[in-house]
């Protein structure tokens, strides 16, 4: 058993329970108790001194493209479509070794920023590149994060009216078969699972309607979740109107892509009817504030989505459009962008923390196990140091975490296992990861 005590605790439970001086008790991979004051139970436990710290649920990353860690810094002044056109030819040369190096570095960076569960949306599968999904799943196991890789796909190339070149698209039948194979090989439906697969055709401008429709049918037949990009840019809105005669959300709904088993990346450009449909159907949203800012895509209507009842989580997005890759920093970014759109009351610090924890867990269909500090839930816990210069004097610990500079981690537990201790990775060698990533990036250049 592990006991964390002497810290402030923000449980992010349904009642918003907080303890100014509390404790958390972990047995195996589960939380068994959370309360105020010191723990007064068994003497034979491992005690963690949490004084000067804030304990929160581990953060949940709902959207990423880990392979992009090997292509950071490209297309620095482009909007999404120009950015993609510059990078598609580079991504056409990725292989399993590059993906493993990029995923290891990206997941380690996430861990160091308080993330305990991450998705990944991998949709580029060059011919002869090897087993790319297996490569990133192996990297996640080495770092020690809970992992929800999404088997992506593209089958609509430039010659057929899509955006990507032929070199990075798949045959429709082959994409569906490979997606089914990924579910069979890697998906773990059991409680406490470390790996779960989602079905994730890439976007309206890179995937045929047939692949979108049949991918949804496959996911529901297999009992897994659905993920895609949607309504990210004005250009996508124009594309859908010109090609399909409707908005992106109307197009998605016509193909069976709204529902409480779906979460969508970005949803920046939504009208009132689209927001209402996402809320009414329980369709989740992965809000990626820094990436949207990097590409100049706009500001997602997070307050309106929450008011409508849609689950909203946070995502760092691919590292080629969000080079920092730190999920903890997105708490502040989400709050700032919400207030730029809707004023200073649009989002509170606690609501921002909820986006990064229980909101993300809802998107992934795991709110029964993740996203809050409650007895019976998985022991995925972030213990943030708030007693240093950057946070000194801020009396409200949640405000210090969200509004202050990125807080170092005293401890990060995933299923009760220490992944970060005193700001250092305890599962992998950070310098070795950086060297491997440097080689991978150099190879692509």
Image (cartoon, rainbow, N blue to C red):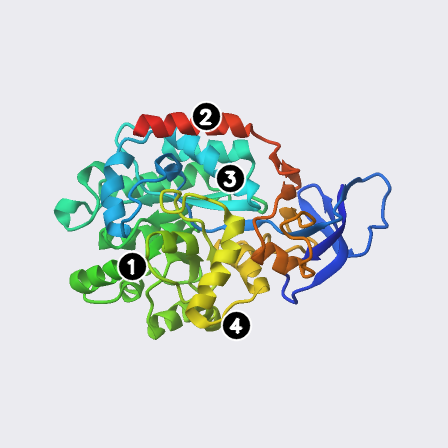
Q: Quick one: 179 or 425, which is closer to the camera? A: 425
- Cα–Cα span, label 3 and label 2: 14 Å
Q: Indicate the position of residue 38 as horizontal and vertical percent values.
A: 82, 52
Q: Which residue is mark 2?
A: 435
Q: Tag count in the figure?
A: 4
CA gap, disc 4 and disc 2: 44 Å
Task: Give the residue at mark 3.
Answer: 109
Tell me the distance, in whole angstroms, between the alpha carbons under discs 1 and 3: 27 Å
Say which residue label 4 marks. 345
Q: Is residue 404 left or right of residue 74?
A: right
| 4 vs 1, front mark | 4
- Tell me what residue is drawn at x 69 percent, y 57 percent: 393
Residue 378 is situated, as x and y percent measured from the top left of the image, at 63, 48
N-terminal-most mark, 3 or 2: 3
Say which residue label 1 marks. 233
Q: Secondary structure under badge 1? A: loop
Q: Which residue in the rendered view is the most extreme toward the left?
A: 159
Counting residues from the start of the chain, the first of labels 4 and 1 encountered is 1
| Mark 1 or mark 3, earlier in chain | 3
Q: Secondary structure at mark 2?
A: helix
Is 61 left, or right, of 239 in this rendering?
right
Marks 2/1: CA distance? Answer: 35 Å
Query: What distance separates the C-alpha of mark 3 from that of mark 4?
Result: 31 Å
Query: Is residue 413 shown to the viewer in this render?
Result: yes
Q: Position of residue 242 (x, y in %)?
A: 16, 63
Check the picture and name the quadrant holding the N terminus: top right
Give left or right: position of 242 versus 178: left
| Nearest to N terminus: mark 4 or mark 2 | 4
* Secondary structure of the residue carrying numbered label 3: helix
């Amino acid at each position: 058993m592990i006991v964390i005590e002497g810290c402030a605790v923000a449980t992010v439970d349904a009642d918003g329970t907080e303890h100014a001086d509390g404790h958390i008790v972990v047995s195996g991979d589960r939380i068994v108790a959370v309360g105020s004051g010191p723990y007064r139970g068994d003497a034979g436990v491992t005690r963690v001194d949490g004084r000067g710290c804030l304990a929160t649920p581990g953060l949940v990353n709902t959207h990423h493209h880990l392979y992009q860690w090997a292509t950071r810094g490209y297309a620095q002044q482009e909007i999404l479509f120009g950015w993609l056109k510059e990078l598609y030819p580079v991504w056409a040369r990725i292989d399993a070794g590059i993906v493993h190096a990029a995923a290891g570095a990206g997941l380690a960076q996430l861990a160091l920023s308080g993330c305990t569960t991450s998705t990944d949306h991998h949709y580029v599968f060059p011919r002869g590149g090897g087993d790319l999904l297996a490569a990133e799943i192996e990297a996640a196991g080495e770092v020690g994060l809970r992992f929800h890789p999404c088997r992506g796909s593209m089958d609509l190339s430039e010659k057929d009216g899509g955006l990507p070149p032929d070199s990075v698209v798949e045959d429709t039948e082959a994409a569906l078969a490979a997606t089914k194979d990924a579910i069979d090989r890697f998906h773990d439906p059991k409680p406490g699972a470390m790996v779960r697969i989602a079905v994730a055709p890439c976007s309206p401008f890179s995937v045929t309607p047939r692949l979108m429709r049949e991918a949804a049918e496959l996911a529901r037949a297999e009992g897994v979740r659905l993920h895609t990009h949607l309504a990210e840019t004005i250009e996508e809105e124009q594309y859908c109107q010109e090609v399909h005669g409707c908005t992106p959300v109307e197009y998605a709904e016509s193909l069976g892509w709204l529902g409480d088993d779906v979460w969508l990346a970005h949803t920046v450009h939504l009208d009132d009817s689209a927001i209402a449909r996402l809320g009414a159907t329980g369709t989740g949203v992965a809000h990626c504030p820094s990436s949207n800012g990097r590409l100049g895509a706009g500001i997602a209507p997070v307050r309106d989505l929450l008011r409508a009842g849609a689950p909203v989580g946070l995502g760092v997005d691919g590292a080629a459009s969000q080079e920092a890759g730190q999920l903890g920093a997105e708490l502040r970014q989400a709050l700032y962008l919400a207030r730029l759109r809707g004023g200073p009351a649009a989002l509170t610090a606690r609501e921002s923390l909820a986006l990064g924890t229980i909101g993300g867990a809802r998107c992934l269909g795991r709110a029964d196990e993740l996203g809050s500090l409650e007895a019976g839930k998985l022991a995925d816990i972030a213990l943030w140091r708030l007693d240093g210069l950057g946070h000194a004097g801020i009396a409200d610990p949640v405000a210090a975490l969200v509004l202050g500079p990125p807080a170092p981690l005293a401890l990060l537990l995933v299923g009760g296992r220490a992944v970060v201790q005193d700001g250092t990775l305890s599962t992998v060698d950070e310098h070795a990861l950086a060297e491997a990533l440097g080689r991978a990036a150099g190879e692509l250049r």
